[in-house]
Amino acid sequence: MARIVMKFGGTSVADLDRIRNVAQRVKNEVDAGNEVAVVVSAMSGVTNQLVGYCEDASPMYDAREYDVVVSSGEQVTSGLLSIVLQSMGVAARSWQGWQIPIRTDSVHAKARIEDIGTEELDKRFKSGEVVVVPGFQGVGSDNRVTTLGRGGSDTSAVALAAATKADRCDIYTDVDGVYTTDPRIVAKARKLDKITYEEMLELASLGAKVLQTRSVEMAMKHDVRLQVLTSFEEKPGTLVCGEDEIVEQELVSGIAYSRDEAKITLIGVADRPGVSAGLFGPLADTSINVDMIVQNVSEDGQKTDVTFTVPRGDLQRAIQLLEEKQEEVGYERLVSDSDVVKISVVGVGMRTHAGVAATMFKALAEKGINIQVITTSEIKVSVLIAEEYLELAIRALHSAYGLDADEE
């Protein structure tokens, strides 16, 4: 017997037929003798509709009331799933975030979980009852309903699994696992049987949409075994786990990409102490996240060019801010480019193998693709290239690292 947390996303509970399908999967686990908690998202499209209602009601809405409105989508799903389970002869009861309670801070619309009460949950598990919990919601220190921000249901599920010491947290979504890269771009992309927390965290933060970054961070911190699988087919998924569970580690496990990139180059920056602080400090103060950075010092050591990337949606704000600071920072001119993408190769095997970056650079050079910026970490190499070469680059790298699936 195992204790399992099952989380179902919006597409998995999009209508009553799909909720019945979910209920059957839950029943299968109960029939196998497992203790089960279920975390559900709102039905597909409902959260967007609720957000729209708030914005239409008042552009300056109260965030506390916003949380009351948007958290209702998950509440509806949890009640419907409990009703369907009961109709199938499964003992089930829905529990709202404040009833458990899932305690959070009081930062409305993007709260963080601080503690989960487990006493009542443990009683329900022992009595054989399925606990159905709406994801994405909790209760703040002021006893008001809070929400965890977009993608928060994954975080709810992992937090619940950690608090109840579950054996596994199954995340059911509309994809059947974690792939070596986007199968829409590379037809030979392979589904991974297992991937480490660190690799999944890098892939999630670099653009892979399978899991929400916060949920992977929490799983790694609390050593919660995660499984990503589809609710639409009976097939194995991908297990996200510690390195010790993976016997033979791949050199590179995956290739991620992000289109949400824009490049800024400041030409002729004075090369003196404090310039970087004067440049990046104001960007940080206005919540503009700077990612890749490269600096080239001129031969005479007096001037430097600084290139960095920001989210594409923040490009105009960043340009305006930097132009206002031109005299203070001391640069000659600013050049920007939003037609760029970031491509990253990720793998814990890089720690013990040389030549990973060289393979990347060679594969791109052979396709005539120019690298504009490079950044590295212990298990990742990222490059910035022109957006027009995205698909060509990913296919070339996928083959170069031997990730292509064998022909059937």
Image: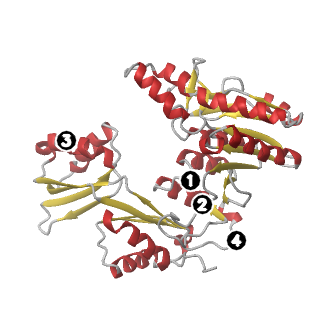
Q: Residues within 10 Å of mark 3 (few under 14, many from 20)?
A: few
Q: Amino acid at mark 3?
A: Gln
Q: Hey, which quadrant is residue 164 in on the image?
A: top right
Helix, strand or loop for disc 2? loop
Residue at position x 67%, y 32% in the image: 77
Q: Are marks 2 and 1 in contact (CB under 8 Å)?
A: yes
Which of the labelled discs sits on residue 320, or is there none?
3
Reading the chain from its start, which is encountered first: label 4 or label 3?
A: 4
Q: How far apart are the alpha carbons under marks 4 and 1?
A: 24 Å
Farthest residue in the front direction?
Answer: 17
Residue at position x 85%, y 46% in the image: 34
Helix, strand or loop for disc 4? loop
* Residue identified by numbered label 1: 210
Which of the labelled discs sits on residue 178, or is there none?
2
Viewer-nearest of labels 4 and 3? 3
Reading the chain from its start, which is encountered first: label 2 or label 4?
A: 2
